[in-house]
Image: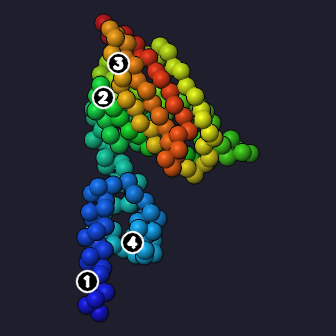
Amino acid sequence: MSISKKSKKMRQNELLSKLDIEPFVTDEELSDIFEVSIQTIRLDRLELGIPELRERIKKVAEKNYLKVINLGKAEIIGELIDLNLNENGISILEATKDLAFEKTKIIKGHHIFSMAESLAMAVISSKVALTGVANMKYRIPVLAGEKLIAKAELTKIKGNEFYVHVKINVKQEQVFRGKFILVSIEE
């Protein structure tokens, strides 16, 4: 009995360490890593007071929404999990079936574009800006149920123009890339 308690305590300590490094790991992924059932992971999280993934993402996102200068929280498509103004940002979007075409379950392109554009806008430090140019490429279809991870990087500022590159991945595979020139129209 003491062996199982020790292994449980060790697992829980390792779980805390893992979530410290990677806070957005799913219960399923943790189950695979620790070679225990998903229910065991959920019980460990409950005992340790660790919220489920969705709540962890929301908590991190709340802090980042406060940094955004030009968009309201509801205007950002996805959960904003990292933001460094005039540098970079990361957002996550769960591709639900209501974002997809009914027959094919493929996510509609305008949702993917909106995710990329809103992240690009969030990254820049302008109070008022519009997309002047968008060059984009959809590489492979995204299906309902998949998780999109968008990463934006400000590559250049030239006068009132902000050049932002956005890449969106699903499971480490790039599904979209966009290059935006955002034009600041502040008075």
First of labels 1, 4 by sequence position = 1
Residue bearing the label numbered 3:
156
Which percent across, then down, holds residue 22? 33, 55
Q: Which mark is residue 87?
A: 2
- Mark 3 closeness class: few <14, some 14–19, many ≥20 residues within 10 Å: some
Which percent across, then down, holds residue 129? 39, 16
Q: Give the alpha-carbon distance from disc 3 to disc 4, as whole Å.
A: 43 Å
Q: Closest to the observer: 128 or 174?
A: 174
Name the residue type under label 4.
Phe
Q: Which mark is residue 34?
A: 4
- Mark 2 closeness class: few <14, some 14–19, many ≥20 residues within 10 Å: some
Up/down of 171 relative to 107, above or below: below
First of labels 4, 2 by sequence position = 4
Badge 3 vs badge 4, beta-carbon distance below 8 Å: no
- Mark 1 closeness class: few <14, some 14–19, many ≥20 residues within 10 Å: few
- Mark 4 closeness class: few <14, some 14–19, many ≥20 residues within 10 Å: some
Q: Give the alpha-carbon distance from disc 1 to disc 2, as whole Å.
A: 44 Å
Residue bearing the label numbered 1:
6
Looking at the rendering, which quadrant does residue 71 occupy? top left
For the point 35% across and 25% down, the residue is: 154
Badge 1 vs badge 2, beta-carbon distance below 8 Å: no
Q: Residue furthest right?
A: 103
